């Protein structure tokens, strides 16, 4: 029987939708798994398991799942024998200390003698020790954000992504302890067959990531400016240049990195480019 790659995905929360969407963009559709523990992909030898994200490192270490999608913070907190394979580029977040909105916060010393609720005691303790702060760590496994409101703690240490959870609970960010990317992790002892499946999946993930970081650009250029414009648009190999029906003009097609985007657009315009179209790319294989 053909081996299947078992992937652990967050059951619900920050990472769930992005994880399912990433697989979908890789051509791997999962039946809606919100209320299921396990679901099979129709068109790739893969089965998905839905777990609490904080439990995923343990499951990957124990080979209940071969790979998993989690925040780096969970990797550091859990200290399991697993390997980070790839940063995925969605739902990145930060681990923060937050206090009540009305409270004055004057740096880490304000936390001395306070009670801080968190699901990340290891990372919080390191932060407190590094800053020589003596505070009480109150470990709870979920709904940390309600702790100050019900008098269970003075502050919290939790993940912040959009900030809406803090806002809705009358809290404000006080310190960032750690920037956390969303990553793909793997078990350290995968079989050859599973490593090959993972390589296949990674190839697709990288194509999707590259496509997201790049845009397809089309523009019209006066022929006398073509050389300057081509220098601005290196493309995958080099840009495509096609003559326009109107004499003296060409159409230039290329690929542009998202990060350089606005700066290059300005230079293109300054060099006489017109009718600039920028369109998303779905997959990109170099
Ligand atoms: C984290 C955190 C907050 C939320 C913050 O939960 O505990 O609840 O994300 O995101 P926001 O700033 O966009 O509102 P997570 O997804 O890890 O789920 P869990 O608490 O069940 O582990
Ligand atoms: Zn979590």
Image (cartoon, helix red, strand yellow):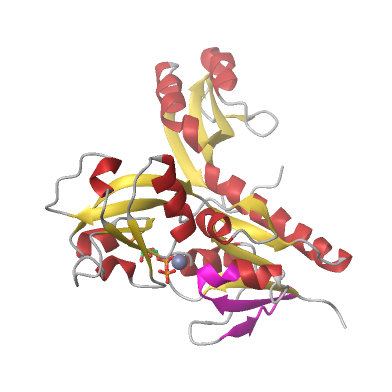
Quarter holding the N terminus is: bottom right
Relative to residue 261, is residue 170 depicted above or below?
Answer: below
Q: Which residues are magenta?
A: 37-56
Residue 2 % position (x, y): 85, 79
- Residue at the image position 43 percent from the left and 45 percent from the top: 129
Is residue 45 in the magenta section? yes
- Residue at the image position 61 percent from the left and 53 percent from the top: 208
Residue 93 in view, yes or no: no
Q: Is residue 179 left or right of residue 116?
A: right
Residue 142 % position (x, y): 38, 73
- Which residue is outermost to the left? 102
Residue 133 lies in quadrant? top left
Relative to residue 241, is residue 96 depicted above or below?
Answer: below
In the image, 47 versus 141, the foreground residue is 141
Residue 30 % position (x, y): 59, 77
In the image, 243 versus 97, the foreground residue is 97
Residue 82 lies in quadrant? bottom right
């Amino acid at each position: 029987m053909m081996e299947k790659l078992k992937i652990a995905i967050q059951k619900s929360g920050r990472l769930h939708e992005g994880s399912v969407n990433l697989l979908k963009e890789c051509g791997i559709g999962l039946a809606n798994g919100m209320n299921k523990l396990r679901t099979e992909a129709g068109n790739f030898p893969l089965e998905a398991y839905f777990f609490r994200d904080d439990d995923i490192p343990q499951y990957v270490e124990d080979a209940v799942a071969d790979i998993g999608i989690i925040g780096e913070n969970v990797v550091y907190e859990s200290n399991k024998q697993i390997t980070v394979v790839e940063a995925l580029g969605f739902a990145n977040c930060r681990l923060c200390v937050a206090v009540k909105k009305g409270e004055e916060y004057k740096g880490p010393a304000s936390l001395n003698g306070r009670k801080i609720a968190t699901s990340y005691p290891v990372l919080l303790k390191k932060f407190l020790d590094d800053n020589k702060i003596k505070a009480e760590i109150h470990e709870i496994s979920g709904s940390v954000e309600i702790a100050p409101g019900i008098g269970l703690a003075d502050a919290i240490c939790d993940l912040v992504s959009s900030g809406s959870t803090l806002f809705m609970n009358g809290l404000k960010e006080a310190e960032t302890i750690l920037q956390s990317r969303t990553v793909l992790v793997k078990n350290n002892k995968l079989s050859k067959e599973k490593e090959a499946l993972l390589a296949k999946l990674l190839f697709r993930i990288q194509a999707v990531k590259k496509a997201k970081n790049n845009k397809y650009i089309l523009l019209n250029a006066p022929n006398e400016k073509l050389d300057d414009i081509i220098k601005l648009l290196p493309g995958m190999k080099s840009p495509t240049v096609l003559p326009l029906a109107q004499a003296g003009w060409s159409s230039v097609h290329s690929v542009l990195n998202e990060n350089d985007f606005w700066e290059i657009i300005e230079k293109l315009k300054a060099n006489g480019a017109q009718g600039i179209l920028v369109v998303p790319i779905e997959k990109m294989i170099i």
